[in-house]
Amino acid sequence: MNGGKKFNWLGWLVLAILLSLWEYGARMSPTLRFYIPPVSQIFTALSHLFVSGQVAGHLLSTLSRFLEGYVIAALLAVSLGILLGYFRFAYNLLETLIEFLRPMPSVAIIPVAVLALGIGDRMIVAVTVYASLWPMLVNTIDGVRNIEPTLIDTARTFGLSRRLILWRIILPAASPYIVTGLRISLSIALILVTTAEMIAGSRGMGFFILDQERSFNSGNMYAGIIVVAILGYALNRLFLVLETTALRWRRGMIARESA
Amino acid sequence: MPILEVEYLSKSYRQLHGENTLAIGNVTCRVEAGEFVSFVGPSGCGKTTLLMTIAGLIEPTSGRVIVKGKEVKGPPPNLVLVFQEYNKSLFAWRTILGNVRFGLEARGDRSIGAESKTRELIDIVGLKGFEKHYPWELSGGMQQRVAIARALAYEPEVLLMDEPFGSLDALTRLELEDTLLRVWAELKTTILFITHDIEEAIYLSDRIWVLSRRPSQIIQELLVEFSRPRNQLATRAEVGFMAMRNEIYRQIGHAP
C-alpha cells in the first residue's frame, strides 16, 4: 500500500490499458461481443440505468439489508466477544462450537435460512448477520484476552467498578482488534447480501445482476457488477476514514514500533 | 491512629507442581499519616506481592491490612498504587491530559475545575507543553511522571509505589526522586515506597524497613533523620549516609 495520499498513476494506467484491451477485443469479435460487450457499451448501459432510475431501488435494497445485517452482527459480536474474552468459563463453554462453525463457508447456511425464514428480507439479513459475525467475534475475543493485566489492575487501584472497567479500559484497549474484525466483516457482509439476493429475492443488486444475465442483457449485467464493485469500494473507503479517526492514537505508535 | 496498618500479613502461592511457596512471611508494620516510608529488599523477595496485597489487588493468605481503621477487602478508595511498568499502566488511547484527568474522573470529579487541576498537576510533575501528546511519544522518565501525576490527581491519602524508577536511567532517576519529594512536601500525601536501590530508599524516606529474601519479612527498621528538603549532593554527603547504606547492604547480604 502506498501512503494513501499520493495519486497512484501507475495503478490507474494499468487499469486503463486493460479496459482499452477489453474494448478493442470485444469490438473485434461479434461472438465475444455477445458475452462480453465493449466497455463503452457497458458504461452507456450504466448511465441509462441510472437515468431511468431502474437500478436505484435495487441499490437501496442491497444497501439497507447490508447495513441492517452488519450493524446487528457488530452489536452481537462485540458484546458476546467481550463476554467470552473476559470470562474464561464462558469461553471454554463455547470455544469448540465457535471453532466448528466459523470455518464453514457461510453461504452453505442459505438453504437452511430459506427453509426457516422463507425468501425475503429477513432471510437475507439473517444470513448476513450469521456470516459477518465470526470475524468480529473472534477478533473481539482476541482483543480482550490480549489486554495487558496491568491495565486492569491500574483501573482497579483507581477504584473503578466492573462496569466502568468494561467501558473505560476493556473497550478502548481492545478497539484495534475489534476494528480489524469490523473491517474483515464489511466485505463478507456485502458478499453474503449479494449472494442471498441471487438465490432468493425479487429486489437488490444480486437479483438484478442475475436477472439481467437470464434475460441475455449482458450490458446491464456488467453494469450491475460495476455498481456492486463501486459500492464495495466506497464502503471500504468510508470505513478507512472512520478507522483512522477512531484509532488516531495508534497510528504513530505502530509506526514507531515497526521502525 | 496510623493511616495504614499491616498485621501478620502472609501470602502463599500454589505452584505448578502443587507445592505451596510462601511469598510473604509474616509482615507487621504501621505507617503514620504524612510519612514517607520505604521497603527495601533484594530482587525477587516478594516486594511487589506485598504491595499488591496492601493495595487490595491480591487477597492475603492470612493477616490483614487496615487503611484508616477499615480492613481492606478489595482496593480501598483512599489509596492508589503506581506500578513499575509505566508503559503497561498508562492508557495508550488517552493523551497525557486524558491520562492525568483519569485520576480525577475515577473519584467522580467532572467539575469545571477538573481541567485546570489536571493542567496544574501536569505542570507540577514538569510536563507542561506535553498535554496533547500520547504516552508513546514520551521517554520512559516522562511516562512515569504521567503515571505519578495521574495517581496524584486521584488525591489519595496513601500512595503506594512499586519500584517506580526501577527501569529508568540513573540521571532521570535522580531527577524524578526530587520531583517526588517536592510533590510529597507540597501535597502532604503518605507514601509507601518499594525499591531495591538502598541509597534511593535512604534519600527519600523518613523510615526504612529492610526485607529479607523470600518469604519476605521485615528484618530491621531504620529511622532516617537527615534534614529536609533533601539534596542529591548534600544529603548523600552527610555523615552517616554511607554508614546507613552499608548497614542495610550487610543486612540484605546476610539476610536469612
Image: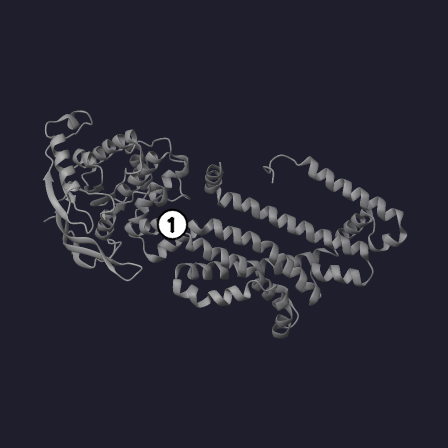
Q: How is the image coloured?
A: one colour
Residue B97 visible within the image: yes
Q: State which quarter of the image contains the N terminus of chain A.
A: top right
For label 1, count other residues whose C-alpha is less than 10 Å away and answer few (under 14), some (14-19) or many (20+).
Answer: few
Residue in the foreground of this view, choosing between B98 and A21: A21
The type of residue carrying mark 1 is Glu
Specify the quadrant of the image occupied by residue A82: bottom left
In the depicted structure, whether residue A10 falls above or below residue A227: above
Q: Which residue is mark 1?
A: A148
Determine the residue positioned at 52% across, 51% down.
A180
- Chain of the residue displaying label 1: A
Specify the farthest residue to the bottom. Answer: A115
Determine the residue positioned at 78% across, 48% down.
A43
Q: Is residue A148 left or right of residue A30?
A: left
Specify the quadrant of the image occupied by residue A110: bottom right
Specify the quadrant of the image occupied by residue A67: bottom right
Rendered location of residue A144, percent (x, y) = 43, 55
In the depicted structure, whether residue B30 falls above or below residue B149: below
Rendered location of residue A99, percent (x, y) = 51, 64
Residue in the foreground of this view, choosing between A20 and A213: A20
In the depicted structure, whether residue B133 falls above or below residue B47: above
Secondary structure at numbered mark 1? loop
Residue in the foreground of this view, choosing between B161 and B124: B161
